[in-house]
Image: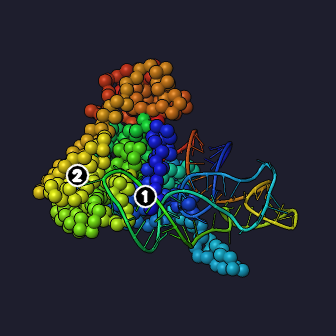
RNA sequence: CGGGGUGUGGCUCAGCUUGGCUAGAGCGCUUGGUUCGGGACCAAGAGGUCGGAGGUUCAAAUCCUCUCACCCCGACCA
C-alpha cells in the first residue's frame, strides 16, 4: 500500500481534491479512454450507500425500477428540437457493428444504416416506450426509474465532478395533469433534499434554474445546490417539469375521463456519482476523506495493539467480541489485525479512507474493559474511553453525534460564506480572482443580464430559491442594471 | 475544442540543456529476523523495451515529427 501525500486545501484546492480521492482509493482516471474513470471498491461502496438511501425513498413513493437500452437511434434525438440541441455536441455515436481482421489489423466492418447515440440521458427512448404503454388515464401515473451509466463526451473532465461516463439514476414519470406532474417534481426534489441533508449531512438550497440554465427540453428545472469548501457551488440533483414537450415529440397520449385525447405531462429527475465529489468537497480535510456515518462503507475500524503473543491473543479475542457486538447493531466493522503493520500506520490509513470512528484495543484496555475511541473529526489526538459493556450503545451515540456535527459544521460554513449584496462593485470584488461565496442579489430576470454578469465575474445564477429558502427579503433592484427585481437569486461560481 | 504544463519500476522524482559504459535514488513491495499505545529497524531480493509510433544518427530516456493520456486556465456541461 503506497503511502499517500495529501496536498493541503490552502496550498492547492484542486490538487487536494485529487489527492483525497487517490489516498482513499475512491477512483482514478481510466487513462486508456479519454475522460472515463474507474470507480474503485471503496468509492463504489459509497455510491451503493447513496443508491440504497435514494432507492428506498423512490420505492416508498410508488416508483418502480426498469432498464432501457444504452443505445438510442439518432432519429429519436431529433424529435425534440431544444433537447437535441442541448445534447448534440456531447453525444458519443455508434456508427459501426462488427470488426474484421485485415492483414492482422482490426478494422471496422459494417456501417450501421442508422447510427445510434450512447445515451446522454433517456427521455427520448423512454418517451418512445411510454407511447406504447400508455393509452388511458387508468395507465397513469406511470412512475419509473432506472439506475445506469450515461455518456457525455466532455471536453474537460474531473473525477466524479465531470467524466465522460458517469453513473446515476434517472426517474421518468408520466401524469394526466400538469398539477400532478408539478407535485411529483417537488416530491422528488424534497427527497433529494432529505438525502443530502439527513444522510450526506450537506445543507442544500432548493431552487429553480433560470431559463438559461434549465434542462434542454424542460418547462422548468428545479435543483438542490450545495456549497463547497472553496466557496463554489455544486448542483446536487435536479428535478424537471417536462410539460408535454416529450409527450408531443413522441406522441405519448392518453384518453381522459371525458373521453378526450391529450398528451401526458412528464417529469424526470436525477442524481449522479457527482454526489461523491460533493461529499469530498464539503466534509473532507487535509488528512483525507471524511464521511458522515450514514454513507460510510465502514463505520468502525478496530485497531488491536499487542507486543507479545500472549497479549495478541488476549487483545484479538476482546476485539472480536466488540466487533461481533457492533455488527449485531448493523454496523460495518473492520477489525484490522494485520500483523506486519504498526498501529500508527493503521490509524493514518483508516483516517484517509474516511472511517468515522476508530477503536483501539490494547492490553491496558483489556485490563480495564474499555477501548480508546477516536472520532475522525475530533480536532486533537484526544481519545475517548468507552467501556466494553454496552459498547454498541456508546458507539451508536458517537456515530450519531458525528453525523450531527458534520451537518452543523457544513451549515456553519455555509452561513459564514453567504452574503447579501446590493452593490455591483462589492459583487465584482467578491468574485475577483478565484473568490466565490453564496451571494444573494437582485436580478432583473433577463438572460442578457445573467450572461453579462457571468462574463464580468464568472459567477452564475445557481438558482432562484424557492419560498422560504435563502435570504430573500422581497423586491429590489437588479445589482447589475438597476431594473426592478421580484426577489433575490443565488449567485456563485460553480462546478 | 483553444491556451499552458506534464508523461522515466506501484508512488515521488533525478538523468534530457550539451545524444555515448549495464537507466539511478528514496518510499512502497517480497523473504527472514527484531519490533508494535500516532507513519519502525536490520539484512537479502524482485520489479523499468524511459506513454506510443515514426524519423535523424555509428549510437536516442535525451534531438525532430506525429499521436495518446493526465493536470491547470478558458468555452460547454450533471
Q: Quadrant of the N terminus of chain A?
A: bottom left
Name the residue: 21% across, 47% down: A384
Name the residue: 39% across, 36% down: A463
Image location of residue A399, percent across then percent down: 22, 50
Viewer-closest of A3 and A113: A3
First reached walking from the N terminus: tag 2 or tag 1? 1
Image location of residue A193, percent across then percent down: 29, 45
Res A132 seen here: no
Name the residue: 20% across, 56% down: A364
Q: Secondary structure at mark 1?
A: loop
Say which residue label 1 marks. Answer: A25
Viewer-closest of B47 and A472: B47
Q: Secondary structure at mark 2?
A: strand
- Tell me the distance, in whole angstroms, between the alpha carbons under discs 2 and 1: 27 Å
Q: Chain of mark 1?
A: A
Residue A219 vertical position relative to residue A464 in the rendered view, above or below: below
Image location of residue B8, percent across then percent down: 63, 60
Name the residue: 64% across, 78% down: A100
* Image quadrant in which you'd find residue A74: bottom right
- Left or right relative to A368: residue A420: right
**How many numbered marks appear?**
2
Image location of residue A194, percent across then percent down: 26, 47
Res A153 seen here: yes
Residue A372 marker: 2
The 10 Å Cα crowd at callout 1, few under 14, some 14 to 19, many 20 or more, is some
Residue A383 vertical position relative to residue A101 in the rendered view, above or below: above
Residue A100 marker: none
- Left or right relative to A269: residue A324: left
Which is in the foreground here, disc 2 or disc 1? 2
Q: Chain of mark 2?
A: A
The 10 Å Cα crowd at callout 2, few under 14, some 14 to 19, many 20 or more, is some
Viewer-closest of A370 and B16: A370
Amino acid at each position: 500500500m503506497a503511502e499517500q501525500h495529501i496536498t493541503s486545501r490552502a496550498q492547492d484546492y484542486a490538487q487536494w481534491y485529487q489527492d483525497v480521492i487517490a489516498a482513499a482509493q475512491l477512483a482514478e482516471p481510466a487513462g486508456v479512454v479519454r475522460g472515463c474513470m474507474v470507480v474503485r471498491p471503496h468509492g463504489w461502496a459509497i455510491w451503493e450507500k447513496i443508491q440504497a438511501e435514494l432507492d428506498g425513498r423512490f420505492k416508498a413513493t410508488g416508483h418502480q425500477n426498469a432498464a432501457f437500452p444504452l443505445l438510442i437511434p439518432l432519429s429519436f434525438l431529433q424529435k425534440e428540437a431544444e433537447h437535441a440541441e442541448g445534447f448534440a455536441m456531447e453525444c458519443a455515436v455508434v456508427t459501426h457493428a462488427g470488426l474484421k481482421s485485415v492483414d492482422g489489423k482490426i478494422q471496422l466492418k459494417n456501417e450501421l444504416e442508422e447510427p445510434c447515440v450512447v445515451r446522454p440521458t433517456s427521455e427520448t427512448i423512454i418517451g418512445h416506450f411510454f407511447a406504447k404503454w400508455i393509452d388511458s388515464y387508468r395507465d397513469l401515473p406511470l412512475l419509473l426509474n432506472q439506475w445506469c451509466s450515461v455518456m457525455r463526451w466532455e471536453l474537460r473532465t474531473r473525477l466524479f465532478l465531470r467524466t465522460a461516463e458517469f453513473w446515476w439514476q434517472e426517474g421518468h414519470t408520466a401524469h394526466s395533469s400538469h398539477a400532478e406532474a408539478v407535485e411529483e417534481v417537488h416530491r422528488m426534489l424534497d427527497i433529494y433534499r432529505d438525502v443530502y441533508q439527513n444522510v450526506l449531512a450537506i445543507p442544500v438550497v432548493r431552487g429553480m434554474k433560470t431559463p438559461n440554465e434549465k434542462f434542454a427540453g424542460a418547462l422548468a428545472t428545479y435543483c438542490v445546490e450545495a456549497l463547497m469548501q472553496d466557496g463554489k457551488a455544486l448542483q446536487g440533483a435536479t428535478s424537471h417539469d417536462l410539460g408535454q414537450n416529450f409527450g408531443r415529440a413522441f406522441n405519448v397520449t392518453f384518453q381522459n375521463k371525458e373521453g378526450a385525447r391529450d398528451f401526458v405531462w412528464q417529469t424526470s429527475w436525477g442524481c449522479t456519482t457527482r454526489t461523491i465529489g460533493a461529499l469530498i468537497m464539503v466534509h473532507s480535510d487535509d488528512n483525507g476523506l471524511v464521511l458522515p456515518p450514514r454513507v460510510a462503507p465502514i463505520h468502525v475500524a478496530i485497531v488491536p495493539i499487542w507486543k507479545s503473543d500472549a497479549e495478541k491473543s488476549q487483545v484479538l479475542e476482546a476485539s472480536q467480541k466488540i466487533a461481533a457486538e457492533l455488527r449485531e447493531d448493523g454496523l460495518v466493522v473492520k477489525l484490522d489485525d494485520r500483523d506486519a503493520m504498526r498501529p500508527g500506520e493503521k490509524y493514518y490509513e483508516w483516517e484517509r479512507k474516511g472511517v468515522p470512528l476508530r477503536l483501539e484495543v490494547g492490553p491496558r484496555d483489556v485490563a480495564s474493559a474499555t477501548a480508546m475511541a477516536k472520532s475522525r473529526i475530533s480536532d486533537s489526538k484526544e481519545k475517548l474511553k468507552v467501556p466494553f459493556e454496552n459498547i454498541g450503545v456508546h458507539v451508536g451515540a458517537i456515530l450519531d453525534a458525528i453525523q450531527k456535527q458534520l451537518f452543523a459544521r457544513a451549515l456553519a460554513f455555509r452561513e459564514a460564506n453567504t452574503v447579501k449584496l446590493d452593490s455591483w462593485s462589492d459583487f465584482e470584488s467578491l468574485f475577483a480572482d478565484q473568490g466565490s461565496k453564496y451571494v444573494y442579489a437582485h436580478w432583473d430576470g433577463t438572460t442578457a443580464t445573467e450572461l453579462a454578469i457571468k462574463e464580468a465575474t464568472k459567477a452564475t445564477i445557481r438558482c432562484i430559491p424557492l419560498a422560504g429558502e435563502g435570504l430573500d427579503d422581497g423586491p429590489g433592484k437588479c445589482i447589475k442594471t438597476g431594473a426592478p427585481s421580484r426577489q433575490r437569486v443565488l449567485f456563485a461560481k460553480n462546478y
